[in-house]
Image (spheres, helix red, strand yellow):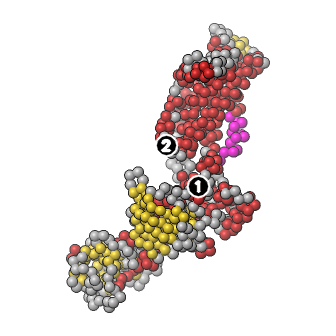
Amino acid sequence: MEKRVTFSSWTIGILFAVPQLLLIFTFFYWPAGQAVYWSLTLQQPWGGGNIWVGLDNFRSILSNADYWNSITASLVFAGISTGLAMFIALVLAALTDRQLAGSRFYRVVLIWPYGIAAPALAMAFRFILAPEAGFMAVVNQVWPGFWDPGLNGADAMASIIAAFSWKYIGYNFIFFLAAFQAIPRSLIEAAAMDGSGVVRRFWDIQFPLITPTIFFLLVINITESFQDSFGIVDIMTSGGPANATNLMVYKIYSDGFKGLDYSGAAAQSIILMVLIVVLTIFQFRFIERRVHYR
Amino acid sequence: MASITIRDVKKSYAKSQVVHGVDLDIASGEFVVILGPSGCGKSTLLRMIAGLEEISGGEIAIDGTVVNKLEPRERGCAMVFQNYALYPHMSVAQNIGYSLKVAGVPAAERTRRIQAVARTLELEHLLDRKPMALSGGQRQRVAMGRAMIREPKVFLFDEPLSNLDAKLRVQMRSEIRKLHRRLNATSVFVTHDQVEAMTLADRLVVMNGGRVEQVGTPGEIYNRPASRFVATFVGAPAMNILEGTVELDGISLLGGSRRLAVQRAGLAVGAQVAVGIRPEAVRLVAPGTAGALDATVDLVEELGAGRVIYVDLDGASFSVMTSEAVHPDPGSTVGLRFLLDDMHFFSSQTGTRLEVFKASVPEPAL
């Protein structure tokens, strides 16, 4: 029987919950409510009153080609970076789980990138991927003009994807490794006795058993790629060139705080929130069916 | 069907050696049980046969082929694991048929063979269930089915019954025995449960501390234990052991406080021996009977068909099992009498069995 702490009095329970509720209210519900309100009004950039405009802000955003470009860029970024970060982490975790030589080394080292703040790692990647001086300069010397994120939108997108994936590989790796290690050794041994080789065992036994973790990481990675990408974009490309990396979260910031269009930015943040909610619901509805919970 | 030959097999991990040179020959079709306390290396030995542990030294051959370097799947063994190791995301049918699927057996034949195995094990109505939805005994049977369907040369069992409740264990025990009689495949069964070992084995291997203590039929192991360890490990309640010194006309026991007037029967005078008597070989007699040892009753355990009487022999505890209708009260005095034929002698130093001349000696004058 699981032991549960119960409170004899209802008020004591509430009192314990109050600090957390206060935090959630102050830093989530209140700002979110404020954003909803702003998105329905026209805010003065320097304060001093507003005008109720209903859904006009949304209409103007959704009829703007720049905004649709931003949505496309965000989806491309989310899809590729989630795929890369999860695939590479899965391979590394599978190798570590097999206790191959050096697995102890990567188990420690692969966790570090997640501990680095996005702007700091973006700074590092900006140097590494600089076309004139970094690692890519060597490639440019062989094929002149091959790589220039300052001019080529695809190169810029590849740069921010590389930086973001690099950070999340470490995060995903920890979860994948934990999932692999939770599979009883005897299951793998039983499969070996049944004549299954290493690769076959991975697909038949290990992969289906870690599907809950894959699903969890998919939701987290997609959500984070919409939100945690801000620091990377800001430092590495500032949304350029020609809006190629102007992801939704970055556009909210630049329209709102640089363009001083608070109402438009608020409307964009509501759309971003709705998009993430819809994507998460979609994942739960259609992908979770293929998950084997034990 | 296959024979297994084990030659001087050793296993060591980074720091410690857990199996110290085991030699064993298992004939084709034989049911061999490896019995020993936990940590004696019995499971490690089994896993080395299966190919799940690397062999640090020596040689294992199945049907004359040395398998040391072969992958588990190339050895033709099937194994039943202690925790069953059923694939939780597959149905019973998929669990049983997995090895055939891996081997590329066509779906139609696979279904036919799964059905056949399920019929033998009475699992037909459960084929679509997931392991989660099965009881312990059913899971056990699925694990057996998974091993059976491959028609392996060798069956390996790693304490497969230890997770079942007592009643189910007895039932599965006889099912395994019946199955073996029908399939007649070479089987190696590892257990720490001596009842399981005695009832299942054609031949019993008793292991301790990474070494084989004795190999023999259950009868041989029980009646002529080769060492003090085997004597006390096999049999319940355990064999009584009394330390003593051999004298000219008998044995002085328990540091001289008791004497047993028996013929030396070949034991050297002055030798330190451990005298073993099985609880069921002790006869209760009236206190003060000549040649018997008097002891104080500590505790009586009623078993229904009989009872175990624990007595105190100058501080040494001693048990007597009797089916006679005697009910001594705790604290009362009883006489214990045993025959030379029922006594086992072990060297106090090495624990090995000391042979005595029994057949030629008539019942000694007590």
Residue A150 in picture, x, y percent from top left: 64, 16
Depth check, mark 1 against mark 2: the one in front is 2
The quadrant holding residue B186 is bottom right
Please tell me which residue lies in front, A193 or B141.
A193
Q: Secondary structure at mark 2?
A: loop
User: Horizontally, is B37 left or right of A26 in the view?
Assistant: left
Query: Residue under circle 2?
Result: A101
Gap in angstroms between the C-alphas marked 1 and 2: 21 Å
Q: Mark 2 belongs to which amino acid?
A: Ala
Please tell me which residue lies in front, A170 or B83.
A170
Asked if badge 1 and badge 2 are on a common chain, one would say: yes
Q: Residue furthest front?
A: A142
Q: Mark 1 belongs to which amino acid?
A: Ala
User: Horizontally, is A56 left or right of B231 in the view?
Assistant: right
Q: Residue at x 76, y 20 (%)?
A: A62
User: Horizontally, is A174 left or right of A157 in the view?
Assistant: left
Residue B76 in picture, x, y percent from top left: 59, 63
Residue A161 in picture, x, y percent from top left: 63, 26
Q: Residue at x 71, y 21 (%)?
A: A70
Query: Residue under circle 1?
Result: A192
- The total number of labels drawn is 2
Please tell me which residue lies in front, B177 or A227.
B177
Chain at tag 2: A
Q: Residue at x 31, y 75 (%)?
A: B346
Q: Which residues are magenta?
A: A280-293
Q: Is residue B69 above or below residue B124?
A: above
Q: Residue at x 43, y 64 (%)?
A: B8
Q: Secondary structure at mark 1?
A: helix
